[in-house]
Image (cartoon, coloured by chain):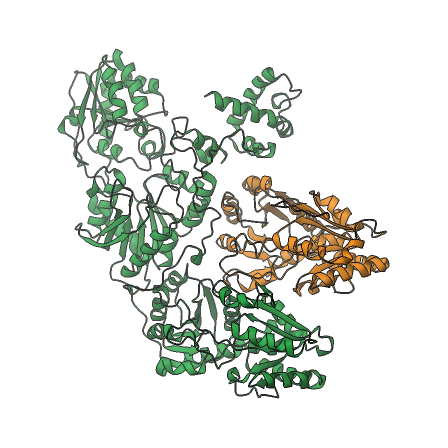
Chain colours: A orange, B green
Amino acid sequence: MKTLKRALIVGGASDELNTNSILRQFVAEGMQTAFPEALIVECGPDRARDHVRNLLPELVLIFGSIMLDDVDHLPAVETARRAGGRIAFWLHDDPYEFDSAYRALPMADVIFTNEVACLDFYPASVPTHHLPLGASITRHFRPVGYRSGADLFFCGHMYPNRQDVLSGIESLSELDAMNIVFCGSSDSPIVSPHWTGLRLSNAALADFNNTSLSVLNVGRELDLANARFDVKPATPGPRTFEAAMSGATQIFFGPGHEIERYFEPGHECLRALSHEELVDHVARLKREPTTSIAIGSAAQARARRDHSYADRAKILVSHV
Amino acid sequence: MRVLFLDTKPNNPNRYIAKAAFSALKENDHVSEAVWVEYGNALIQAREQDFDAFIAFDGEEADNFVVRNLAELIPRSAIWFTEDPYETYRNTKVTTSFDLAFSNDRASVQAYGPKGRYLPLGADPGMFRAINVAEASHDIFFAGTAWPNRLDFLRKLRIARPSLRLNLALVSNAALSEHVAAYADEFSFGRGLAMRDFCSAANRARLTLTLPRAFSTDPDNPTAASDTPGPRFFEVALAGSTQLVDRSIAATAADFLPSTAFLAYDDFDQCLGLIDRTLADEDSLHRIAAEAQNVTLERHLYANRIAAIVDELIALEPRPRRESHAQPKILIISHNSVAQGWFGGSEIYADHLLTGLDADVAMMAPVVSEYGITEYRVTDRTGAEIDRVVIDQPVLQGDLVHEGFEQEFQALLARHAFDVVHVNHLIRYPVSSLAFAKASGAKVTFSLHDYYLACENFTLLGFEGRYCDIPNRPPATCTICLSRMRDFPMVQQAPRLRMMREMSHHIDRVLYGSEASWSIFSALFPHLQDRGQLLAPPVSVPPQPANRTGPKRLRVAVLGNFSSVKGADTLLKVFEGAHALDISFDIFGRVDSEYLPALARIQSVEIKQHGIFPPGKPPSEIYDCCVALILSPWPETYCMTLSELQMMGIVPITTDIGGQGERVRHEVDGLKVPISDPSAVILALRRLSANPQDIDRMAAALRKLSYDGPAAFAAKADSIFADVVGSAARLTPSQTGHRVFRSDEIGIFLAAKRFITPNRVTIAREPIVADNLMTVANAVAPHIAHGWRDRMSFSRVLMGRFTRIAREDGTMAAFRRSAAWARFWFIRRVRRR
């Protein structure tokens, strides 16, 4: 597709059950920025068919998880198709929900996945492209200034592998001198002086990311639907780009190299392969706070250049 | 050449290699089109389109009906075994169907006889990484399964050279865990690296170590080890890392010379020596890595491997294309058969197909049992049993998939290799059967006898006691209806309907009896809109006029079962209200026991019950009736009763809905009344009893109607099936002992395998938000929305809290503001019923 006149962005799962439904607004905003002349509408799956009938979109983008059994996109898809529209899926829960991606195959003209490793597993019968999540300049940008917050900050759901990181660094003595904040949600109670059970809104998270000396980025490892191929994730967590746009100095924990395609280690982010390395990075940033400002600013500049949802939208539409 | 490509292992953790090979296939100069298939669609694609060649990749799980038929159907076929020598003992059986067998293990080639060829794995261009020894972050990288021999080696290495920066990515699995428990203190095990990360990690290490595997699943050869490079060899080379390889597996491609393109060692000490020498000499690291990378780029990409296969395929003499069956081979599946009794129109219809088609037809139906159905019998047209499906656990209401049934069903389909699976009804079958029928290479057709695909409540008679009209109501209506219907407290409509729609993609043709029912069905299944075909069921009653009995009392017939789905509730009210009219009623057919007391209580009008009769042969007294009532409150998909009455010259009064309403022209050859409206029926009867000339006029119009009898019906069905099958080549049946697939292996995913849950759905706890209710307000027809506004103003009086409502304002914005109150009103209203 070279130009875009009318597009409908539909949530993959019902908004009531989808804590990530706000991302859809960012995608819509980004698409509008990239295609200022276009009419972009976004809605939850319950309203999709009505909107298709009214809008007759050239592009229907189904964005998000399609794993739950009670949302059926077929009626909206068929209505759009018969009016000449093209159907794209942008799945951002790969590889954890990869098995459910097969549901999209009968309906999709093109599939986008946030997980580059899944490109090796999608059937070759439908064109599939890698498209990581991004960030919204208007929603996530915060000027990078004084780091008044925690030395190391993390917010998210405490899957077991993330709990391991917390307990791993807690065993190190250097932690006594540091101000560590882990917050978010957890399935089981976490006993730790560094943990607070507190969920943050998307906007508040940007503030925390912006004012922390460093931000821990560790992906999740909880498969809900990845039994067929056991795809190993390569792509960093979904909030990576939002944090960068907020000027965070992110420390990526784990062996993956994929992050290097998005941010340059050492200049725009830091990498840690072990708990010791993670704590060493934080200690160094404490000694040299200007480094945190420098890395965070560089990351922000990179995010503005390459990782906004407007950039993602351009790539997406070019492949439809 | 048009090439079909299949990775034979359905859930292949090395799928990335298959995809790399496929990408190379697409780029090959001799390939005009390459088509990727999986087990769900491979056979049907091969039957519908012509392919010149078939390439099967990997070879595991390949002993199955699909692979065997693909290899025989397509004129040139090759299989590339990539798991030799560990799987050679299984592979030899598979090669009998193929023209060529390529193996990644040189020593295994001879097992495949003259068809055998050696073809090691290779590398995908995407793995290329520029060599960067100077900035390496580790000295040695090793990734792989933690076989015990490897852990021993690594332990020794650590002890001998503790200062080396090792990057280890060790993977354990359930089968291995007991063997590696002893090493748990020294090594950590992970789930492994994504391939791209593997290549990047290799690129960042000065040396990449390859250790042999000494572990096999072959019971006769438990220590089988390969002497052929594993998949990683060329991948690591392309990723730009210097490799250290055990010489026992270093019988690599002839152009990979040890010391020039990689480092080979015989034992641990030699390996250690090589490590010491090479790490001290950065130039040699660079040289070796560069040589390996260049040679790989020139000769060891998947493009090279695929070219080797394609060149051989082209040189083959193609086998002649297989023909189709002279007559399509059809399996009808149904929930019941005439032979087992307690049947209705759909069983009779299936029976006509079974006995009347010229095609080679068999029928599958469950064997009814009070303990739950665990047997399905397959019979030929004479009723003789030709096969049987037996399962341990019955298919329950609510099962969307059923592994036991699916396995046996696949084995059955393989034993017969049907061209078409015709679904007469899906009750007692998991809906995944549609996908498995298609996976077996059969076309799938479906007869629309009711709306079972749309709802468990297959007549769509909702909690209001009449047709629910769900295509014109918001989908959430189903939640309310199902929670109130006595027998459906726990059914989740949305997941059921989603799965039905997904599976019905496999239906090639829907045969329907009336446009009215088709329009309801296709509104709910829009992707099937172009796949419908009208085929009216056969009418067996020969035309014969009813007796015109003169000025005697009008006798009104009720033909067919006296049950709620046939409008018994309305009929009772009609009987009660007809006392002032000079008419009597005759009921022909079974009366449901719940209505017998009510019928007995009606004394004011004469009602004769004639009892059950054989299908199509009502007692001759029916000809004394010249008017009949068909008051089904739901849109019948056809209504055989109506056709029979028309042929008998009996003027019908029917409900104005569905197939019954469609085939009556009001005032021309019958009368139509609204659903559940006894007074309209009584008015019509009064009018007819006072004006017998109208009856005569309409009866005369009936004589102009004609319907297909069984022979004409079967002929039409034959031509439909022939059209559906086209010239698709026939498949070869396969008897026993081959691999059948699970639903996930053919691409079916369900978060919950049943749509019936233990929690009763109640509206009060359901988080219906205002936005959802906007859907309710928006999606209804204008006159209904108008009614909502009226009722909302009523509740304004009750609530007293409205300041503006839609009635005054009339805009959608006001609707939105009042939607929360609308919700409250709706719940109250429903609760009061």
Vertical position of residue B785 compared to residue A36: above or below: above
Quadrant location of residue B702? top left
x, y percent for residue B18: 50, 69
Q: Is residue B170 left or right of residue B436?
A: right
x, y percent for residue B116: 39, 81
What residue sits 58% from the left and 82% below the top?
B268
Vertical position of residue A131 compared to residue B470: above or below: below
Quarter of the picture containing the C terminus of chain B is top left
x, y percent for residue A160: 61, 53
The residue closer to the viewer here, B240 or B336, is: B240
Quadrant location of residue B3? bottom left
- Figure disc tally: 0
The residue closer to the viewer here, B311 or B376, is: B376
Q: Is residue B191 left or right of residue B529?
A: right
Quarter of the picture containing the N terminus of chain B is bottom left
Vertical position of residue B626 compared to residue A229: above or below: above
The residue closer to the viewer here, B109 or B448, is: B109
What residue sits 17% from the left and 30% below the top?
B545
What residue sits 47% from the left and 46% below the top?
B752
x, y percent for residue B84: 44, 76
Vertical position of residue B200 compared to residue B454: above or below: below
Residue A20 appearing in the image: yes
Extreme residue in the left direction: B620
Residue B129 appearing in the image: no
